Amino acid sequence: MAKLFTSSIGKKLIMSVTGLFMILFLTMHMVLNFTSVFSAETFKAVCDFMALPIVTIMVPVLAAGFIFHIIYAFVLEIGNMKARGGAKRYEVSNKAATDSWAARNMIWLGIIVLCGLCLHLTHFWADMQLADLTGGEAADPNMLLDQTFGSWCLTIIYLIWFFALWMHLTHGFWSAFQTIGWSNNVWYKRTKVIGIIYATLLMGGFAVTAIVACLRANGIL
């Protein structure tokens, strides 16, 4: 078991599996946030549902996968730097696939994603989930949407974050399946296309939510 966490192959497998956890985590949050586009009441109702015990147990598990993914990304990057340009963080059978801009800059994309995550936590998680955990009163989610996306500057920053996530996911999706052995030369192009479509729908949902919230907060919509 210890070798799984310390060997090169083991680290790549952990990166792949936790990356898929990250996709599930983001998907769940996108669906939740996207309900705000339809009505404030629906968004509030879904946020209340997320506070149910069965959901509050699932969220930390997915979040833990997210955290492990970030930690091992830096561990592997440090290992690659020591190896002076050795193997990439993800196992791929097609060398040309690793020549993309996203593949060469996954660590920098990851840093942008991490900074955006920290920003997001201060705007929403700290005033909602953390407030619940510490015995306080959670803020109204619709109020937080207005406060955050009422700022054009913050909205642009969030859109940049979503684009960085899109770049990260379009590479990470297919390479994760490649690493765990669920993709081959036949399925490589298919998983790559599926990854692009899924990442586009996922981050497009986040972007639409932010833009609509911005327009509403500024009285344009």
Image (cartoon, rainbow, N blue to C red):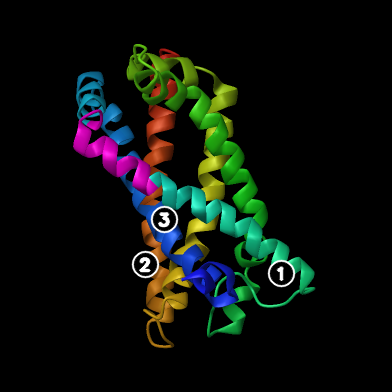
Which amino acid is tagged 2?
Ile
Q: Against 55, is 170 above or below?
A: below
**Label 1 – label 2 distance at C-alpha:** 28 Å
84, 197: nearer the viewer: 84
Q: Which residues are magenta?
A: 50-62
Where does the image place residue 141, in percent across and percent down from the top left? 34, 19
Where does the image place residue 38, in percent across and percent down from the top left? 24, 28
Disc 3 secondary structure class: helix
Does the magenta run of residues contain 207?
no
Q: Which of the 4 image quadrants contains residue 49? A: top left
Does the magenta run of residues contain 54?
yes
Q: Which of the 4 image quadrants contains residue 21? A: bottom left
Q: Is the Cβ of the residue at disc 1 closer than 8 Å to that at disc 3?
A: no
Q: Which mark is residue 215?
A: none
The residue located at (68%, 62%) in the rendering is 77
Q: Which mark is residue 80?
A: 1
The residue located at (37%, 33%) in the rendering is 209
Q: Residues within 10 Å of mark 3 (few under 14, many from 20)?
A: many
Judging by the rendered image, the residue that carries numbered circle 2 is 194
Question: From the image, which quarter does the C terminus lie in?
Answer: top left
Disc 1 secondary structure class: helix
Q: Which mark is residue 199?
A: 3
Which is nearer the N-term, disc 1 or disc 3? Answer: 1
Which amino acid is tagged 1?
Asn
173, 81: nearer the viewer: 81
